[in-house]
Amino acid sequence: MISDESLGTLTSSFRGELIRPGDSGYDAARKLWNGMIDRRPGLIARCTGVADVVQAIRFGREHNLATAIRGGGHNVAGNAMCEGGLVVDLSPMKGIRVDAAARTVRAEGGATWGELDRETQIFGLATTGGLITSTGIAGLTLGGGIGWLMRAHGLTCDNLLSADVVTAEGEAVTASPDHNADLFWGLRGGGGNFGVVTSFEYRLHPVSMVMGGVVFHPAARAKELMRFYRDFVRTAPDSLTTMMVFLTAPPAPFLPTHLHGQPLVAIAACGLDPGPDGEKAVRPLKEFGPPLVDLVGPMPYAVIQGLNDPSAPAGIRSYWKSEYLRELSDEAIAAFTAGMSRATSPMSQIHIHHLGGAVARVAAESTAVPQRSAAFVSNVIAMWPELKDDAQEIAWARGVWETLRPLGTGAYVNFLGDEGEERVRLAYGEATYARLAALKRKYDPTNFFRLNQNVRPA
């Protein structure tokens, strides 16, 4: 418990809202996207600016509190909330400023991708962002950042130009190629291990209309479609990013009613050229099969950014298992198709993201994202509404993943749940993990920032 007496010192210097158990708004403030996370912190410090973050971090250190950092709060592991300790909540910090001439944007750590895109799209600009608009910019960037623009422009962290950080000592510093370059390296993929990032500066790219959408096929043709997809992506241009999705058809207006509730397999695509060349690039997707439903065509970038939102409602119970794949082998295809056929919740899905392009052209050692040569990253996503089904749905996701694990090379950090140190090490690989541990020793030797995909100080 945090006593009234100890809280008094923070109250006098804190400009934001301090929320404790029993306060009105406490339950709303502790809710996260993943409905499985039900933790009751002793104090939620909703920060309005850098000074508030500094005061909150110093308070947490002084009172030896387990301290969680919340940005958008979308992560499946629920690391943004803790039991009994302090939550440093950046969600009120949403300031965004676009420099259209320089093609850059600076955004505070509480902003989401939907909010960032809304500001940058006014100028016809964008950077690689999340696939759900409620995803926080902070967590996605710090863990790497896959998205629709990645094959053309790299991961989100590859577009990071600088970051303002509050360290474990409660000091405000800047990290960039010219200032604290070692910290800047660690922030690009190393997660929240080194400090609280209060603002991010990104490089922007001209993006407005795209050639995007989804083609849907019956699940019975999944193996045939996946073999076609494997061949298709080998020659796909870098301007085109695609993913395969196994799903049960939702009662959505864009799907005929006779398909609602039916198992489907889909290919989603986003090409940066909405003109004739872009249409040519996606034509094989539109012709193969042919699809049951073809929704691929020119559309605003903001539309495709929100395309997945209905599939991941806030408060849903969710459990993920991820694996990078060097190739979409026949064994992997069999594992995916068999796994989805055993799905027990109509909300569950399997995603297979095609990487390569600009992602693979970044040297593995230049950022803390070492998995640059993998061709795909998969995510087995169990989603369900009821507590009583937890064991069943978790078992399904784990079962599918167990068949994929011998074929994979480790997990994508942003798709990791609470899976332990071994999985974190495997996600980074020994060389990158050792470098991160040495950096952790420099910037956070006591492991104050430990409620994350944790890297222990060397």
Image (spheres, rainbow, N blue to C red):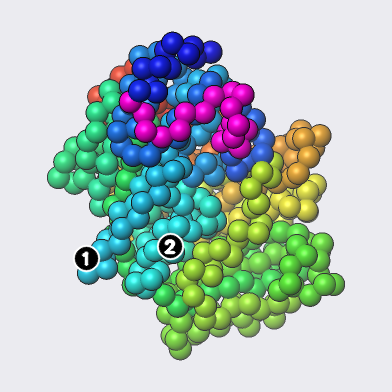
Whether residue 23 is in magenta: the answer is yes
Which amino acid does the dot numbered 2 rest on? Asp
Label 1 neighbour load within 10 Å: few <14, some 14-19, many 20+: few
Q: Residue furthest left?
A: 178
Label 2 neighbour load within 10 Å: few <14, some 14-19, many 20+: many
Dot placed on the residue nearer the N-terminal end, 2 or 1: 1
Q: Tell me which segment is drawn in magenta.
A: 13-30
Q: Is 162 placed above or below 147 here?
A: above
Which amino acid does the dot numbered 1 rest on? Ala
Residue ID at (66%, 44%): 315
Quadrant of the image occupied by residue 317: top right
Residue 76 has which mark? Answer: none
Count of residue discs = 2
Residue ID at (56%, 36%): 29
Closer-to-camera residue (27/420): 27
Q: Quadrant of the C terminus?
A: top left
Badge 2 is on which residue? Answer: 117
Q: Is residue 111 visible?
A: yes
Residue 102 has which mark? Answer: 1
Closer-to-camera residue (356/134): 134
In the shown orientation, is residue 78 left or right of residue 457?
right
Percent coordinates x, y for residue 78 in the rendering: 56, 35
